[in-house]
Image (tube, coloured by chain):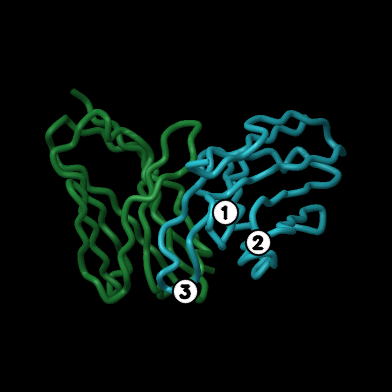
Amino acid sequence: GAGVSQTPSNKVTEKGKYVELRCDPISGHTALYWYRQSLGQGPEFLIYFQGTGAADDSGLPNDRFFAVRPEGSVSTLKIQRTERGDSAVYLCASSTGQGIDAGELFFGEGSRLTVL
Amino acid sequence: SQKIEQNSEALNIQEGKTATLTCNYTNYSPAYLQWYRQDPGRGPVFLLLIRENEKEKRKERLKVTFDTTLKQSLFHITASQPADSATYLCALERSGGYNKLIFGAGTRLAVHP
């Protein structure tokens, strides 16, 4: 596709359930990022992939959160035992490379997660 | 810890005027700074990137300045239009250059006809 695609756009779940959020980046973009945005706040970094590997996962809040990118393109963010505090918009972004010329981030429209 | 401050109150201006948004940061010396636009219910859209050794960058009606001494960036929209109404986010690079960005909370701009 032309842009970063995220599914589902909205997800409502109950406390304690498991959820998966999917991101399909722009074709050819080697770098992929997950950010989380709470209401009235800016996006907060979660994890960065360069190719298939998680180069920096320091933003993941705890071990309930995990992300994979097995073939270097599509990524899945997985949240176990969801809590009400996990409610937020989860944004995926991709870019062309790394280093000082990593350039702009192309964001998807986000997946809005609501934990009841 | 690193902190980014943007005006939390909405900025209301008249069409045709210049909008100026402020981004202040503390405790960090970023290699570059980016500005994004975000519309309600949408993902952020990249506008401009300015590096630490650049004082000013322009793109069409947009201008960004970067003062590393004051630890401040200013974002200007000249000849503003109602279509410019959105939230504008400032973001600092905090890594070795792979867009591990710290975002401010954003400033909402409303341009009135």
**Quadrant occupied by the N terminus of chain B:** bottom right
Tell me where residue B21 appears, x and y as whole percent.
Answer: 28, 49
Above-or-below relation of B108 to B57: above
From the image, tell me which residue sits under label 3.
A99
From the image, tell me which residue sits under label 2.
A59
The numbered mark, 1 or 3, whose residue comes first in the sequence reads 1
The answer to whether the residue labelled 3 contacts the one labelled 2, judged by CB atoms less than 8 Å apart, is no
Tell me where residue B19 appears, x and y as whole percent.
Answer: 21, 43
The numbered mark, 2 or 1, whose residue comes first in the sequence reads 1
From the image, tell me which residue sits under label 1.
A44
> What is the display colour for chain A?
cyan
The answer to whether the residue labelled 2 contacts the one labelled 1, judged by CB atoms less than 8 Å apart, is yes
Q: Are marks 1 and 3 on the same chain?
A: yes
- Residue B103 is tagged as none
Mark 3 Cα-neighbour bin, 10 Å: few <14, some 14–19, many ≥20: few
Distance from Cα at disc 1 to Cα at disc 3: 20 Å
